[in-house]
Image (spheres, rainbow, N blue to C red):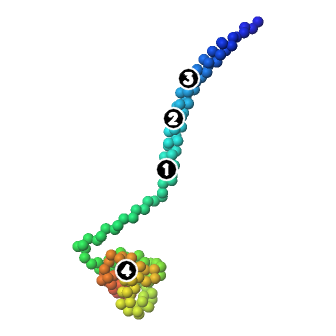
Amino acid sequence: MAKQHSSKGIMWATIIVAIVLIAIIFPLTMKQTKSAADAAAADEDQADVRIQPVARFELTMAAAPAADEGPKDGQTIYNSVCGACHNTGVAGAPKIDSKSDWAPRIATGTEALYASVLHGKNAMPPKGGATNLSDDEIKGAVDYILSHVK
């Protein structure tokens, strides 16, 4: 006949098997938990990188020009300020090489041209946007333009 096992023996065998399984599985799961935590941290770092803005904008004050520079001539001012629009005709600006564009403006007189540049006209801001220039420097730039279109 078959030998009958006592319930105490089965209970102790089950406990021993459970302890052995826990002793084997527990360290493996702890290792994976650490790896999962590291992976989660890495994913979080990657997410931070992905959601960064494309560009950063910082508004600062422009440095004041040195006091010993002196006034600029008309050609320098035209090339650094006026030429951006008047070389290409942006926003309806008369091109420097087009006498037909300048003819009606020249007909109004030099003082009217000075006033238009100093106070702004249509899309052109006052002084062409270079508010740090003196009125005489702006008038020099106008004279430089007029010397090219007459």
Does label 2 or label 1 sit earlier along the sequence? 2
Q: Quadrant of residue 56?
A: bottom left
Q: Which mark is residue 34?
A: 2
Q: Which quadrant is the C terminus positioned in?
A: bottom left
Callout 3 environment at 10 Å: few (<14), some (14 to 19), or many (20+)? few
Does label 3 or label 2 sit earlier along the sequence? 3
Which residue has dot 3 on it? 23
Q: Secondary structure at mark 2?
A: helix
Extreme residue in the top direction: 1
Residue drawn at the location 43% of the way across and 85% of the way down:
98
Quote the CA–CA distance across marks 3 and 4: 83 Å
Residue 148: image location, x then y, percent: 36, 85
Q: Secondary structure at mark 1?
A: helix
Q: Secondary structure at mark 4?
A: helix
* Label 4 with label 1: CB-CB less than 8 Å: no
Quote the CA–CA distance across marks 3 and 2: 18 Å
On screen, 116 above or below 4?
Answer: below
Which residue has dot 1 on it? 48
Does label 4 or label 1 sit earlier along the sequence? 1
Callout 4 environment at 10 Å: few (<14), some (14 to 19), or many (20+)? many
Quote the CA–CA distance across marks 1 and 3: 38 Å
